[in-house]
Image: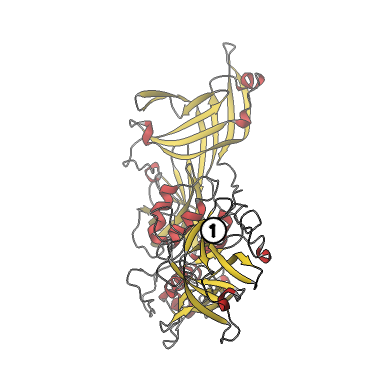
Amino acid sequence: MRLRPEPGEQLAWLLDLTFAGRIWRFASETMEVADGSDTRTYLAGLAGLRVRLEAEPLSTSPSPPTAQIEVVWPESVAALIALGHDLSAATAELSMHRAGIDRTWREVLIAGRVVEPDYDEILNPDGSRHSLVTFTVEWAPWDDRATHPAPSAAVAADTWPDRLPDHDGRVYPTVWGRPGSYREADGTAIVAPGSPALIVEYSSVGEIATKLLIAGHRVASATVTLLYRDDAVMGGWSTEVVDVTHETDSLGQLCAVVDLSTEVLAIQQAGDYWICWSQNSGALLSDIDGAELSTMGHLIEWWLGRSIDRIDRARLASVRPMLDRWKVAGYADEAVSPWDYVADNLLPLVPVSVAVGPDGLYLVLWRWDSTATAATITEGPGVTHVGPVQYQAPPWERCNRRTIRWALDAASNEYLRRTTIGPAPDPEDPDAIGSLVVEQSATRLGVLDGEDLTTDTLPDRDGAALTLLWRATRDAASRRRVVFDCSADHAWIRPGDVVQLVSAHLLIDAAADVIAVELDDHCRVRLGLEIRPAPPTTGSVVPIGDDDIVLPQ
């Protein structure tokens, strides 16, 4: 919950520190704070404070908030430590509070462990003691030890006694969307190997397969297209539409299977099988609504839900509608870290950064297509820039032409489609797209090629084009950054917000993305801002033919 006070309204910091078997409560001044039917007393003790929140655009490395804190402790910390208490094992919650409202409505900025505490003792005139304590509060280190699926979800003697021994150790596939079901540029349907099928019941008499495992979970589709090896056919594959049923393996794990016992001998003896999910629906079911899982936002949340680390589901839900503009299809057939899978395969396709808050990991969405701003930052009394304006990358590190390869043929590990973005695209090439941003960049700098992208996850041209357009918006234009020191009236602004920056001194009147926020003990704020380039005013755009998608230009 973000705290947004009225202009001039008093803000206070609240520190709840758990140490020596109790909760110590500190604020910048002594205050009584209502907490439901109770009242909490916060002692004047916060002598110094600096909080930093940041989100580097398109970074897949979590950016946990940190707080550097100095406290005047009313008792002797040394005496408590002498009794055996460990200050380095303390935990703390730091929140921002509006005076006069219930504590329930505070904004928690960081909750975590106390790191590198220092303390010193002060002897009072009456012989008593108090202490000066400094420390940093950090979120727990990022550590995803989970794997999916479980080690038992693999072909073995104790899961499928009549399996094909050659498939021992093969991990049950996790399949989402409709992999293998693609279209040519002219709309012609493509049926390709989309995900593997494992032989889990096999008869050595006649060397025939009688049952295939196609997913280690319940699937939405009642039928699939089976591709089986047939050297007599051009391309080496024949197809057959087959029914899907569900049953448990010998350990009670639910699987989606295809029964081959009633199929013709040519199919049973093929020995090499793949699935194209081109029939009535797809594979994996969403945890959120139980429907077919076929969009990016649902898929990211599904994978992160298999992680042992905390996930801020409320914040994930807020960005899910935007991410669901990307259709997805694919599979994983090895035990993987959920976080690693998301970071390596999904996040590079969408305009997000990874951040960490008190409720866990969440995604910051960069809306470079949006013209709406959260606030206007105008340089003047109480608002000044700190340091020079800095460019982030030289021209030769930018990119205004790039290709993405997609529509994976899982059997050959080749990509069947490709889409290219660049200046002046060929209107006769249906896989070429352009944008005003890349045209403007090429006019100024010439054509700058970027590294080609590949994805096993995107099944259609709309998603491929959308990824290229987002990346071009970021990569083709220059980026400048500047820091502004602002009053407490701006303390509610957070990384990912868009503001209008106005500075007569720097000759700037432009939209800017907030990439970092620093707050001190008086709630004064320093904003790290990335100034957006001026939007192009001329040029042409090749649309991707989806009225529901608003493309960044």
| Residue 391 visible in image | no
Please tell me which residue lies in front, 229 or 530. 229
For residue 315, above or below residue 455: above
Residue 115: x and y in percent read: 61, 36
| Residue 221: image location, x then y, percent | 43, 65
Under circle 1, the secondary element is: loop
Task: Identify the residue shown where x is 36% and y is 69%.
Answer: 549
What residue is pinned by disc 1? 216
Task: Single out the residue that lies furthest toward the front.
Answer: 205
Figure quadrant of the N terminus:
top left
In the rendered image, residue 533, in percent from the top left (x then y), is placed at 43, 67
Judge left or right: residue 121 versus residue 425: right
Residue at 53% from the left image edge and 51% from the top image edge: 306
Above or below, comparing residue 140 to residue 121 in the picture: below
On-image quarter of the C terminus: bottom left
Q: Residues within 10 Å of mark 1 (few under 14, many from 20)?
A: many
